[in-house]
Amino acid sequence: MSKGFEVNPNAFINVSIKRGENMGNRLKTTVLLASLTAFLVFLGGLFGGETGMIFCFILSLVLNFFSYWYSDKIVLKLYKATPLTQSSKIYEIVQRLCSKRSLPTPKIYSIPSSALNAFATGRNPNNAAIAVTEGLEKALDDEELEGVLAHELSHIQNRDTLVSTIAASLAGAIMMIANMAKWAAIFGVGGGDRDDRPHPAVLLLTAFIAPLAALLIQMAISRSREYLADKTGAETTHNPHGLARALKKLSTQSALPAPAHTAHLFIMNPLTKSGVASLFSTHPPLEERIRRLESIRP
């Protein structure tokens, strides 16, 4: 062994801890996605018997396939996003951050809105995109922009964009089926090929509980991924305070017209919520996100 070579045991410990955290997050996400799929199939069986189970299982496969290949294109078109020029300051920051993380540079889009917000989408790092509002580039300084963009790149690196899209598709299907089943239960329709179908009151209760359960599972997936993206982004920039300051600014002007099923994609909830409704937000509490960021040593 050469004399100039030294082994730092702390480096191995830190790498092991990070790998353990990533594996734990992946396992948690996998379990939650499996729970959504199982719940969808369970609803199909409850309301439509064996035929309903088969239908919902096939539906989940179709949704996953569709989400994998086309979700990014749909959401970008939904927000009228247009490609950002390479002369933009945001493009330069993204290229620099990608170089740090050894990531391919994603496509970058601009959303015509004065709101302060951004999101990432795409099925993998080689097929990813970041979209930022026009207001974001104007309102944030370089350190704050770097923090936001590092957060979005973390979502791409951790495959959160695909996970979140699949979760949203499954949760949306559960809510749709539950809504249909609610009316079927009211009018005494359903049960498929089963003679021992549940009492209409049970069906009706399940129809009301199912959307809430799906929302809670989707919320658990989204919140855990947001915390991880905040942390990974801060580690990339070595400046957690930049992202913390950006989140404070975004919280004052993040709202923009957005369908509820896409709200979880953004770095800050684009839907205006208060009171009890805020408890069911797909995003973690702002105060907790900032507290965690400020506790990170640069």
Image: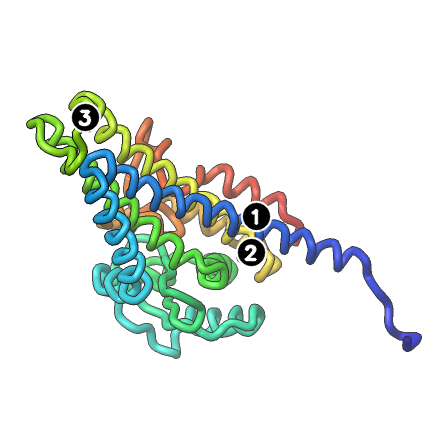
Q: Position of residue 262 (x, y in %)?
A: 28, 51
Residue position for label 1 = 24
Q: Position of residue 49 (x, y in %)?
A: 21, 38
| Residue found 42% across the figure and 67% down from its top | 124
The dot on residue 204 is 3
Image vertical order of residue 227 relative to residue 105, above or below: above
| Residue found 16% across the figure and 29% down from its top | 195
Q: Is residue 81 left or right of residue 158?
A: left
Q: Is residue 36 visible?
A: yes
Q: CA distance from mark 2 to mark 3?
A: 43 Å
| Residue found 29% across the figure and 56% down from its top | 61
Q: Is residue 254 visible?
A: no
Q: CA distance from mark 3 to mark 1?
A: 36 Å
Whether residues under marks 2 and 1 lie with C-beta atoms below 8 angstroms apart, the answer is no
Query: Observer-nearest residue: 50 or 93?
Result: 50
Q: CA distance from mark 2 to mark 1?
A: 15 Å
Query: Observer-nearest residue: 89 or 161?
Result: 161
In this rendering, the label closer to the viewer, 3 or 1: 3
Q: Amino acid at mark 3?
A: Leu
